[in-house]
Amino acid sequence: MLKEWVKPEKPTDEELSTRLETARLELAKRQMVIKEKKLPVLVVLDGWGAAGKGSVLGRMIKNLDPRFFKTETMSSLDSEGLRKPFLYKYFSKIPEAGKLSFFDGSWMDDVTNGYMEETISKKEYGKRITSIKRFERQLNDNGYLVVKFFFQIEKKVQKKRLEGLLSDPNTEWRVNPSDVWQNKHYDKCLKVYDEYLEATNQFVAPWYFIDSSNKKWAELQMTELLIKNIDTAIANSGREVPILQNTFPMKKLPKLSEIPLDKTISEDDYKKELDRLQKRLGELHNELYRRKIPVIIAYEGWDAAGKGGNIKRVAAALDPRGYEVHPIASPEPHEKARHHLWRFYTRLPRTGHIGIFDRTWYGRVMVERLEGFCSENDWQRAYNEINEFEKELVDWGAVVIKFWVHIDKDTQLARFTERQNTPEKQWKITDEDWRNREKWDLYEVAVDEMIEKTSTEFAPWHILESNDKHYARIKALKTIIKEIEKRLKEK
């Protein structure tokens, strides 16, 4: 792809100056259109060291309103990033609707450098390519414009620029050892870059090559291409996105109506089992930390099903320095303005830690679906997006445990009534709980479909029969212990 690229013809200096002045003004106008139309725009600048990415970007943004764009320098991972999933540092920095983000460097650097330095295997390289393609497609499907530029220069030009930078004490800091290595191994890098660019050149996020032999010419190419892409994205906004067929292996579970809820445990057995299981989970937490294995425990269930009490018994077994519970409510404005999984990606635990979610990313296919907070296309598409998200977590090395806390309608009514009639528990019951109860049958249909379409073999659902809260707590602890022990044996 890169090898076959033909340089565009550079205009005369006079034409270049005229077109560049026009393009700068037009891009500033488009920034206001982006804000008005709430279009999130992610601009990625990749390419050879000393190709002028930073210089061109600096010139381009001079005419933009700094309140509505951000520039991100994607250098090597810090200690926090090393303990998070591969795409974490990129997903966490995606722009809000109506704003632009410019990434100086991207996920391309992590993958190609790691592959050439042999810090990632060929198999891992292939997995990361798949992850990148999913990430870019998901952004596009969720209304993002992703524009990727590769700054191309020839070996001789790169060498001359590097020598010039290194000769000046004020600019030598801009050259890192990998840039020098890159020039010495230009042909090897060219081959790897070409393969990467070919593999990730998607219709939803194509690559654009920039002739970087001249800074003003490079700026003009980039600016005009960005304007064209913005115009196309605005024209196509509001379109429905194709629903992809599931390709992940599934674990079949019964419908909620088929699950018996008469399971109980005696008070004595409960106390004995609770003590035994909490001690065992505490031991496993130490081993998880030592071996740097992250655990994500997700709770969904009916209102008053006992999620809070269940979480409390799990958390009581853990070292408080090594876990965090995330109570998930309606998204805040800055969360609503991004990809629906962003607020969960940014809450993921570090390796060796445990993240417990009291309600989760499944809100999109339940409450958002039934309350009309998203379109049908959005929630239908979300099943596959969620499966891909959880696959990323498992491939990262996480243990993903998902619970549906299940009760029947009569038990819920009894618990609602008790809460309403007990002063110290009244804070637990709201008008929204009663409204949701009126939609029980609709929610049951949605939950059955959710379980059917997202109970994958790598992240299956576990049903906690919770008419007897004690039984559900013991089952949850047993399930968590079993899944962690299974992962520790695999490692």
Image (cartoon, grey):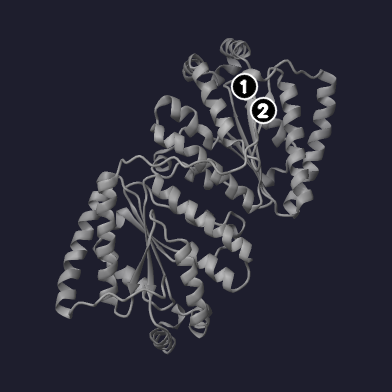
Measuring from the top left, give residue 243's x and y in whole percent.
44, 40
**Tags 2 and 1 touching, CB below 8 Å:** yes
Marks 2/1: CA–CA distance: 9 Å
Q: Amino acid at mark 2?
A: Ile
The amino acid on which the numbered mark 1 sits, given as a three-letter code, is: Leu
Which quadrant would residue 253 be assigned to in this image?
A: top right
The residue at the point 74 percent across, 29 percent down is: 475
Q: Is residue 469 left or right of residue 439?
A: right
Depth order, front residue of 121/311:
121
Q: Residues within 10 Å of mark 1 (few under 14, many from 20)?
A: some
Vertical arrangement, residue 177 with respect to residue 302, above or below: below
The first of marks 2 and 1 along the sequence is: 1
Q: Is residue 65 visible?
A: no
Q: Residue at x 76, y 51 (%)?
A: 490
Q: Quadrant of the N terminus?
A: bottom left
Rendering quarter of residue 316 = top right
Residue occupying image coordinates x 82% and y 31%: 275
Q: Is residue 478 above or below residue 154?
A: above
Q: What is the crowding at mark 2: few (fewer than 14 residues within 10 Å), some, or many (at least 20)?
A: many
Residue pointed to by mark 2: 463
Determine which of the numbered discs, if any, sits on residue 256 in the image: 1
Number of residue marks: 2
Query: Secondary structure under badge 2?
Result: strand
Secondary element at image label 1: helix
Residue 485 seen: yes
- Apparent side of residue 38 relative to residue 266 in the rendered image (left or right): left
- Name the mark nearer the viewer: 2 or 1: 1
